[in-house]
Amino acid sequence: MKKTFVLPALAALAILNSCSTSQTMLEVLQPSQIVLPDHITAIATIDRSKPEKGFANVVEGLFSGESIGQDREGRRRAQLGLTEALSRTPRFSVKTTSVEMSGSKNGANMMPPLPWSEIESIAKRYDAQAVAAIESFDTNTDVAYSTSTTKHKEKDGTTTTKVSYTARRNLRVYVGWRLYDPKARVVLDETVISEFDEDTGFGNTQEAASNNLRSLYDATRELSEKIGEKYGMRIAPVWITVSRPFYTTAKGSGQEPMERAHRYVQSGEWEEAAKIWRQLTNAPDQKIAGRAAHNLAVAAERIGNLPGALDWAKKAYNQYGNKASQSYIYTLEQRIADQDRLNYQLKART
């Protein structure tokens, strides 16, 4: 969804990662990946991935190392993550339900879509115009072991060999989703989202190394919640928190005014700080002027003036040669493009 510019970003990170900078946090409304019909204002969430009754999923758990209740808790956390994400959107309200339905035999595969009569019933019961369903849930875990030896010379001259064990576990969680529109009788979205976790444990025995891995139950819960949040951000514009670095000091004649401006920032007086930065853009030292221009770009973005922020960022890089501002230009260009998408997604509904 967001462009990645690897080399400029790495260069900017190296430049800004110093004691001469600080961070300010911004709340940014991120557009969704797909656009839903205007008539949808509330979404009900359900779980349709419950395994059928029987021994199949229990046996699978015995062989895969899954703890009892792990998948059920994972499904619950995925639904929680979706609900949490949708609570941060101005576009929809979310209706969390206790609806839990059986899916495939082991819950890992998507079944055909639910009958429209059931979707319509759920939507009516919860006063929603769409139903978001977890349609499948699966985990894949593998653990690999390795050993290393170290030799240690004792005081009596003898040599002892110590064997250390390492356990490396890879966990991937897959959650399938469908979004139903009962009015149009259309499945608006169908996708599978996955998250990956790698963990390492050490010990004097293989069993000890395995026991030092973090709880598989906890890891599954966390990945599942991330997946739910990801799906929420796929279907709805969501508020997120981002950080922006800015300069707090400079060398030579710019040191005192830059530090004074930083004190204004610390007390929340960004306008006063901006007055100082504007003066410093006329400094004969291009490095001081570049830092001041970069800070003015951040100040403009804070108040939602994205074109003004982009202008200052371009001046900081093109006119004053502040390399760290190059990646910020890309970030602001993406934000402006995102704003155009948001304007469409949040246009007045009739």
Image: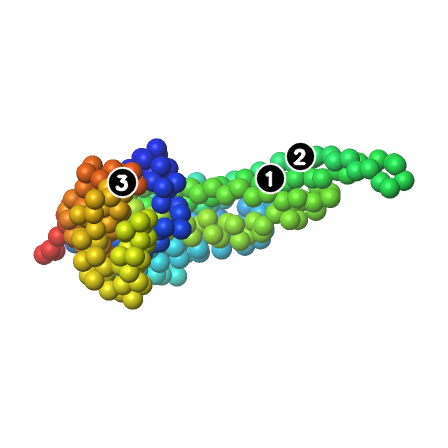
Check disc 2: other Cα within 10 Å, few if <14, some if 14-19, many if 20+: few
Residue indicated by mark 1: 168
Q: How many marks?
A: 3
Q: Residue at x 44, y 50 (%)?
A: 224
Q: Amino acid at mark 3?
A: Asn
Q: Residue at x 34, y 33 (%)?
A: 7
Marks 3/1 in contact by CB < 8 Å: the verdict is no
Extreme bottom residue here? Answer: 267
x%, y% of residue 345?
17, 49
Q: Residue at x 31, y 53 (%)?
A: 255
Q: State the mark number for residue 322.
A: 3
Q: CA distance from mark 3 to mark 1?
A: 43 Å
x%, y% of residue 275?
18, 58
Q: CA distance from mark 3 to mark 2?
A: 48 Å
Q: Is label 2 in a helix, a strand or a loop? A: strand
The colour scheme is rainbow
Q: Amino acid at mark 1?
A: Arg
Q: CA distance from mark 2 to mark 1?
A: 8 Å
Q: State the mark number for residue 146.
A: 2
Sequence-wise, the earlier of marks 2 and 1 is 2
Instruction: For the N terminus, give its image quadrant.
Output: top left
Marks 2/1 in contact by CB < 8 Å: the verdict is yes
Q: Is label 1 in a helix, a strand or a loop? A: strand
